[in-house]
Image (spheres, helix red, strand yellow):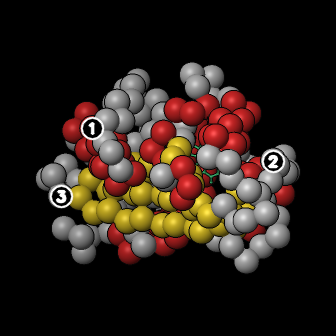
């Protein structure tokens, strides 16, 4: 099954931004369908890990369509916050996906822990992927990028927690970095590299 190259997939997300980013990471010849086009809403993310949640989504959309599905789940883990926001990264931004609120919550939680910004606040972005075939077989991969939380938000590029994430080995946040640079080093790029063989 895995030896046969995939020609068509249904993406396991209803997030337009994600669809655009994922398209750029997949070969141009691939026929990519979306749940939105078929009017299928997203399942509840009830897993306790990124891998579990990406499996829930890929399985759900494959079962609904009878096609091979590819789904991702990603987020930011901060060590001193016991890996939070983690799988709740999107949920910390509330119903309107307001990341000013999510970022404020990060600083509030760090303040509660009396964190000193002179010390490095270690964290990482994680991206989990699942490809799910209609015969119920699936394949998973994960990509991570280590970094630290900046003492204040910096930069207007990117999305989500980008303005507060400084990747290891760099002096700027993802919010200050060109997308063309970020997208060659980040968690998503690393996770996609591991599934390239299927396409
Ligand atoms: P989900 O994978 O749709 O559950 O949500 C992932 C959430 O993690 C996003 O809404 C962002 O808050 C955060 N996130 C994931 N990847 C990135 C990234 O590359 N930059 C900034 N935030 C990210």
Query: Mark number for residue 60?
Result: 1
**Residue 46 shown left or right of residue 116 in the figure:** left
Q: In this view, does 27 lie above or below 22?
A: below
In front: mark 1 or mark 2? 2
Residue 22, x across and y down, in percent: 54, 53
Q: Does residue 179 appear to the left or right of 18 in the view shown? A: right
Q: Which residue is drawn at 42% across and 73% down?
A: 194
Residue closest to the eye, 163 or 134: 163
Q: For residue 160, say whether it is visible.
A: no
Residue density around tag 3, few if under 14, some if 14–19, many if 20 or more, within 10 Å: few
Residues marked 1 and 2 touching at CB (< 8 Å):
no
Label 1 CA crowd tier, 10 Å (few <14, some 14–19, many 20+): some
N-term mark: 1 or 2 = 1
| Residue 85 sits above or below residue 105 on the image | below
Quarter where residue 147 is shown: bottom right
- Residue 153 is marked as 2
Q: In the rendered image, which residue does mark 3 sit on?
A: 137
The label nearer to you, 3 versus 2, is 2
Identify the residue at horizontal 58%, vertical 67% (top origin). Answer: 145
The residue lying toward the viewer, choosing from 61 and 92, is 92
Q: How far apart are marks 1 and 3 (CA)?
A: 13 Å
């Amino acid at each position: 099954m895995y030896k046969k190259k995939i020609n068509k997939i249904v993406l396991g997300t209803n997030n337009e931004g994600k669809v655009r980013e994922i398209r750029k990471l997949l070969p141009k010849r691939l026929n990519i369908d979306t749940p939105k086009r078929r009017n299928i809403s997203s399942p509840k993310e009830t897993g306790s890990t990124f891998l579990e949640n990406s499996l829930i989504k890929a399985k759900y959309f494959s079962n609904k369509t009878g096609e091979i599905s590819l789904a991702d789940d990603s987020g930011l883990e901060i060590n001193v916050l016991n890996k939070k926001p983690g799988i709740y990264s999107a949920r910390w931004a509330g119903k309107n996906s307001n990341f000013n609120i999510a970022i404020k919550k990060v600083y509030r939680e760090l303040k509660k822990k009396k964190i000193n910004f002179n010390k490095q606040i270690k964290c990482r972005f994680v991206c989990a992927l699942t490809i799910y075939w209609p015969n119920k077989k699936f394949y998973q991969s994960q990509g991570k990028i280590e970094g630290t939380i900046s003492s204040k938000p910096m930069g207007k590029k990117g999305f989500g927690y980008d303005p507060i994430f400084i990747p290891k080995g760099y002096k700027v946040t993802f919010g200050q970095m060109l997308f063309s640079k970020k997208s060659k080093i980040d968690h998503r790029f690393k996770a996609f590299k591991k599934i390239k063989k299927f396409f």
